[in-house]
Image (cartoon, rainbow, N blue to C red):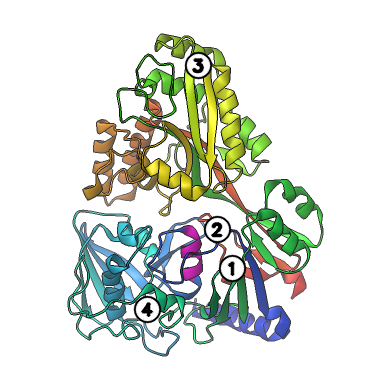
Amino acid sequence: MRRIRTIMGAAVAALMLALPAAAQELRVGLSAEPSSVDPHFHNLTPNHQLRSHVFESLTDQDKNQQPIPKLAESVRAVDPTTWEFKLRRGVKFTDGTEFTARDVIFSYCRVPKVENSPSSLVVSMRAIATMTAPDPYTVIVTTTAPHPILANELSNIAIISAKAAGAPENLTFNRAGCTGVEAWPKTEDFNNLKLAIGTGPFRYASFTRGDRIVLERNDGYWGEKPIWQRVTLRPITQAASRVAALLAGDVDFIENPPIQDLPRIKQNPQFATAEALSSRIIYLHFNYLTETPPPGVTDTAGKNPFRDRRVREAISLAIDRDAIVARIMGGVGVAAAELLPNPLPGTNAGIKPERPNIDRAKQLLAEAGYPNGFGLVLGTPNDRYINDGQIAQAIAQMLTRIGIRTQIDAMTASTFFARRNRAEFGFWLSGWAADTAEMSNPLRALAATPDRNRGMGTTNPGGYSNPAMDAKLFEALTIVDDARRNALLAEASKMVMADFGLIPLHFEVSVWAFRRGLTYTAQMNQYSRAELVQQAAASR
């Protein structure tokens, strides 16, 4: 194995020497701008994507989102609630200081101390009870209960430098923050790059909000060094402008090209694309909170129709998922039967997406007491997911065919999420990317009975509740054995689907486009990572 690594390392080094200086710069067009350089500030895909270039975690995810070692060379379950992380030796931060267990403890203590975080990373370390370091290269973590997905969850927590932040020598982990720390690092000290010091393959050269982020290769990186000496990340949020920049040669690589432009990009020999099925489900959800009609629901004789399973099933039967994938998604989607694509852990092999059945849908509505249907407003973002506004329009037409007269209330994502979380919709379209790529993640967030203290139902503002499913989910979360846990999760998933607790529509397929001569290892987590962009063999 050592010989193989040596040969690979020599090949990469030779390639770097062979590339002319101009070819060692990669220019990337981003579809969304990260909200901060601070790796603990915002639990958001664009932020995780950016921080992965500079800040590393104890674990990482492979292209299928399964956990792999990173700063932890090995992870071992000592018992159901105790985990041993052996840290990689010889790793240095870009300021030259050595990475040790002290940095790990300080990083985890800092997460709950981030001020004004719009979406905290605490959710990824909720299970941790204690964290100790018996020596500089070992970290022992205990959890409040068996928590088999810990290694995957920790791939979200970046390790920052304790020394650069002025942390005391002797740190004692506390779930609310280490004791003895006089001042916690401020987000602005990352954004001005003062504390933007990581162990990753790149270092920050500049951060100009609204314009660009420039990275330089970390030549002291412990792992395989990227071929790019310099990477420029430009937020180009308008899809048409992003494509125009690629076609004009202003950038080399873009994420999320619009579906309507894919044919001409693919037919142009000067460009190439890469695709990957994502774990992002697009779904419909209901407001169960009141006996009376929720917002936007009319003509129901004073009742909340979504409390009747027959109504929910009728809505599912009204939807032609294949038509949405073919006509609106342009084929870059896969019709969904549950909340994660098979064969990811906890899914059910052989389960099929619901087929449309208009007659049966009308019959179910009549049996539920709505022979003439009712009125409905569907809330949706129109700038967050692939063609989300168009999908909502199609859903409205499909529901109107069975007598549910549906109108659309479309808005920007920021407005939509704020209103959704205030339960201002009776029925809405949204999406969810499972950052652990196993079934407990969407079940806990979207389907579990809301319970803030247990971290359940965190994105279930409509209050769906299925106690039998909750029990099955809680049982699964205590099982360390993968096969047994995943079997229980599959049963819990079936229970939600059989209850039509929420309605899965499709999984997005992520697409990247780039100039001829490049290749990209497409990521299920939808990340664009510069170190995974390579020169194609024929262009070397």
Taking the image as drawn, is residue 279 in sight? yes
Q: Residue at x 50, y 32 (%)?
A: 378
How packed is label 4: few (under 14 Cα within 10 Å), some, or many (20 or more)?
A: some
Q: Is residue 459 magenta?
A: no
Q: Is residue 376 above or below residue 105?
A: above
In the foreground, 16 or 320: 320
Determine contact: label 2, label 1, CB under 8 Å.
yes
Q: Quadrant of the C terminus?
A: bottom right
Local SS, label 2: loop
Mark nearer the viewer, 2 or 3: 3
Q: Residue at x 31, y 73 (%)?
A: 107
The residue stretch that appears in magenta:
45-52
Reading the image, the residue beneath label 3 is: 361
Cα–Cα gap, marks 2 and 4: 25 Å
Determine contact: label 2, label 4, CB under 8 Å.
no
Mark nearer the viewer, 3 or 1: 3
Local SS, label 3: helix
| Type of amino acid at the residue the image marks with label 1 | Leu
How packed is label 1: few (under 14 Cα within 10 Å), some, or many (20 or more)?
A: some
| Type of amino acid at the residue the image marks with label 3 | Ala
**Numbered badge on residue 523:** 2
Query: Upstream in the sequence, badge 2 or badge 1?
Result: 2
| Type of amino acid at the residue the image marks with label 2 | Gln
Reading the image, the residue beneath label 1 is: 532
Query: Upstream in the sequence, badge 2 or badge 4?
Result: 4
Q: Residue at x 24, y 42 (%)?
A: 475
Query: Upstream in the sequence, badge 2 or badge 3?
Result: 3
**Numbered badge on residue 88:** 4
Q: Is residue 301 left or right of residue 174?
A: right
Q: Residue at x 68, y 60 (%)?
A: 242
Q: Is residue 521 above or below residue 99?
A: above
Cα–Cα gap, marks 1 and 4: 22 Å
